């Protein structure tokens, strides 16, 4: 297991953690805090403009652990699926333009009015299969992120590491897993499934599970403030050979998003060194 006690190089700040910042502010803020990697969402990359975003990141020599996010595959009809595929191709282009190590994808949920969960699963598999040749040609690895099952209906019907690993096995090269502790920590089969996922884990996200959780989407905790055994899980992930960056991704409308972003970054770095 890697020693993070003096580390700042393995920490990547996810732009969702400092929601009010533009890409430029994120890059500058990380420089001020002595942090050398980011994980932007597509909105701030698009707002900056693709060429400008790429130049900004290259000039600052900042590492990009992943671009968040594409996916959301299930749709009600063929036209809807084509729209999704086109948008995901744009996401691949964006990831390539900023030198992201991978593009994170979430599955998507049930199409409006549908109760066909099996059909949604099949659409996710087919959507990934349709996108993969484009991503391989662009040299952008895709990372499917299983989300906590509370999001199965509206955000992601891939909810376990086991399901994500099955998809990787079926679809082959170019598809890996975004391993987010917030979404998988509860799984009684986590140790075995982490080991099985192995080298397919290509990006790693941390935050914490607060008790009580006041909002299903926007009340994630700073690492160390909740009940996830972060050290234990990181040890399991790194035992598979994972040597990549560690993204701090916190959606926190009532707490961290209201604080001074520079303070948030300093706290992220401190927790990265002490509890992650
Ligand atoms: Zn995540």
Image: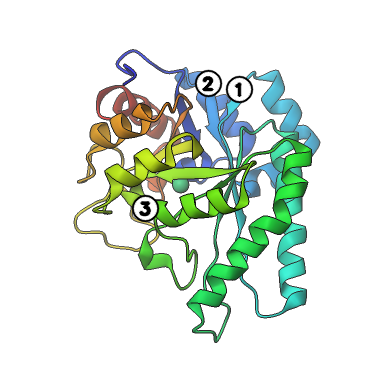
Q: Is residue 249 visible?
A: no
Check whether the beta carbons of the residues at disc 2 and disc 1 lie within 8 A of each other: yes
Where residue 211 appears, x then y in whole percent?
Answer: 19, 55
Label ID, residue 270: none
Q: Is residue 52 left or right of residue 207?
A: right
Residue reaching furthest to the front: 170
Q: How far is the residue under mark 2 from the one under mark 1?
A: 5 Å
Indicate yes or no: mark 2 CB to ligand 1 under 8 Å: no
Report the Cα–Cα distance between label 2 and label 3: 25 Å
Crowding at mark 2 (Cα within 10 Å: few <14, some 14-19, many 20+): many
Dot 1 falls on a residue whose secondary structure is loop
* Residue 260 x %, y %: 41, 37
* The residue at label 3 has a CB less than 8 Å from ligand 1: yes
Name the quadrant containing residue 101.
top right
As helix, strand or loop, the secondary structure at mark 3 comes to: helix
Marker count (numbered): 3
Which disc, if any, is residue 62?
1
Residue shown at the point (60%, 62%) measured from the top left? 125
Q: Kindly identify the residue that appears in the image at 31 percent across and 16 percent down.
A: 3
Q: CA distance from mark 3 to mark 1?
A: 27 Å
Q: Which mark is residue 36?
A: 2
Give the residue number, with chain letter if any, for mark 3: 183
Of the residues under marks 2 and 1, which one precedes in the sequence? 2
Residue sitting nearer the eye, 255 or 173: 173
Residue at the spot x=65%, y=74% of the render? Answer: 75
Residue 64: x %, y % from top left: 59, 30
């Amino acid at each position: 297991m890697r020693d993070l006690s003096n580390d700042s190089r393995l920490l990547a700040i996810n732009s969702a953690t400092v929601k009010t910042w533009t890409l430029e502010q994120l890059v500058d803020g990380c420089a001020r805090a002595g942090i050398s990697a980011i994980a932007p969402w597509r909105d701030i990359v698009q707002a900056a403009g693709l060429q400008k975003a790429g130049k900004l990141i290259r000039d600052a020599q900042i590492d990009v652990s992943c671009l968040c996010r594409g996916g959301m595959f299930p749709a009600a009809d063929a036209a809807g699926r084509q729209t999704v595929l086109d948008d995901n191709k744009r996401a691949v282009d964006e990831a390539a333009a900023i030198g992201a190590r991978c593009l994170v994808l979430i599955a998507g949920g049930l199409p409006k009015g549908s109760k066909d969960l099996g059909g949604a699963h099949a659409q996710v598999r087919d959507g990934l299969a349709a996108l993969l040749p484009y991503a391989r040609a662009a040299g952008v690895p895709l990372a499917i992120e299983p989300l906590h099952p509370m999001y199965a209906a509206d955000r992601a019907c891939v909810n376990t590491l086991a399901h994500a690993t099955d998809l990787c096995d079926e679809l082959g090269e170019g598809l890996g897993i975004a391993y987010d502790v917030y979404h998988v920590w509860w799984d009684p089969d986590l140790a075995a499934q982490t080991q099985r996922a192995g080298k397919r884990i290509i990006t790693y996200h941390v935050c914490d599970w607060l008790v009580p959780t006041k909002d299903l989407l926007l009340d994630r905790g700073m690492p160390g403030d909740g009940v996830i055994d972060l050290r234990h899980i990181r040890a399991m992930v790194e035992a598979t050979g994972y040597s990549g960056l560690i993204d701090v991704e916190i959606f926190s409308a009532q707490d961290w998003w209201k604080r001074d972003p520079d303070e948030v970054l300093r706290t992220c770095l401190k927790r990265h060194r002490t509890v992650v």
